[in-house]
Image (spheres, rainbow, N blue to C red):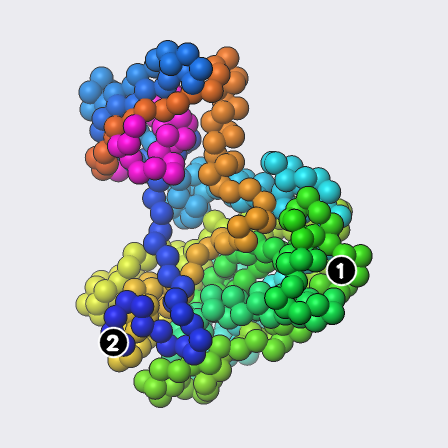
Amino acid sequence: MAGQKRASGVRGETSPPQCQPRKTATATAGCVNPICLRGFYQLIEAQTGEVLATLGSAEARDGVLLVSCKDRRSSCCPPCSRLYEKDAFQLLAAGLRGGKTVPESVGTHPAVMLTLTAPSFGAIHGNRDQRQPCRCGRRHSDEDPRIGTPLDPSRYRYVDQVIWNRYVPELWKRTVQATRRGLAHALGVPRSKLSEVARVRFAKVAEFQRRGVVHYHAIIRIDGPTGADAPPPSECTAQLLTEVVNAAAETVAVELSDPMLLHMAETAGAELRWGAQRDVVALDPNTCTTAAGYIAKYATKATETATGGALVKPVRSYRQLDDLKLTEHARELIRTSLTIGERTRLEGFRRWAHQFGYGGHTLTKSHTYSVTFAALRAARASWRRAQDGQHAVIVRSHLSYAGRGYRPGRTLPLGADDVQAGLQPRSRGSA
Ligand SMILES: [Zn+2]
Ligand SMILES: [Zn+2]
């Protein structure tokens, strides 16, 4: 039935892209809104089984242990966000220059950085360039809240923009598929045999523009058949990859199939495509570090760029929306997403209304692009233990959630990095 969770509005989409924000604990001093846990954890010497330390909330000053929020969003927690950005940089850079268990030879594989944008949904405020002011006749400062908002809200295509946000993860998926097809064609092998000669890897970050639409910044790399340790065929050059990626982005489309969605789409019609502004740049050892830093920066941003600074929690009703302090443009985007969800019974529009319809992850990557965030965090905990002269430890924990935030006298406990290691990937409370 169309109203069910897995209902889909586009042809060929089997599983609508949806995600649940993950909240796990970490431990970095400086967190502005830490998570309080009740229970205890023990650090146990892996080789000997000796209990090195036991920390329990019962002995803590306020009866709780604190671990940091680990929020990636700079507007929520600047210190945790800075650490996340550094990890995101390491993850992205390792896929371009090696390191962090990735062979350095990966730096010789062809790679490109690409920016994929949305089409226009109506004229918005913003200086056209250095010399030409905005169409409204003013020259806006960078801080002007009018930037990114419609010149004429009554003519702005809100419905099309929200639908585009909703299905941009599917458009990306098809772009990667088209890149693989294009590469197979260029190499003269059937698509089904491409993995026998080359593999396409990617990492991408979603960025919200001030107009409330998603742009993607991505890295695409070609490996040999066995992965990052093997070079691709000599015909695979950065030039070839640039051409293949450009052709893929030019041709892919997502077709809307839901009749009500088609009825509501204003002028975009039945197909969603990338906007005309596209940038594909070949990377080399001199530019890969800059590219990784550039993309990692976007990983700490969210919808606050379009809401006037506020981060919006899930919105379930129009009444809830009325109580929020937002720019009128952001309010209209959320309202539109709620309305589309109501009329089409496509749950994703209601579920992700607070993100203007976008339900994809912020940072995604191919399984074998480089390392994982969890591996980087575990390596950091291990390094800190080594600094303290400790060997490998096992964490045994039994912890449950007990609220958020500091009270006078609360501090993050020593060894809390290990709580983080112990909490992932298992849920809290396991031994
Ligand atoms: Zn934090
Ligand atoms: Zn203007």
Which callout, 2 or 1, points at the residue further toward the start of the chain? 2
Of helix, strand and loop, which one carries label 2? loop
Ligand 1 under 8 Å from disc 2 Cβ: no
Residue 419 in the magenta stretch? The answer is yes
Camera-nearest residue between 207 and 174: 174
Camera-nearest residue between 132 and 86: 86
Q: Is residue 39 above or below residue 151?
A: above
- Residue 314 position, x and y percent, is 28, 59
- Residue 162 position, x and y percent, is 40, 73
Q: Is residue 282 above or below residue 69?
A: below
Residue at 28 percent of width and 67 percent of height: 5
- Mark 1 neighbour class, 10 Å CA radius: few under 14, some 14 to 19, many 20 or more: many
How many numbered badges does the structure rendering display?
Answer: 2
Of helix, strand and loop, which one carries label 1? loop
The disc label shown at residue 236, or none: 1
- Residue 53 position, x and y percent, is 34, 14
Residue 327's quadrant in the figure?
Answer: bottom left
Residue bounds of the magenta highlight = 404-431
- Of helix, strand and loop, which mostly describes the magenta segment? loop
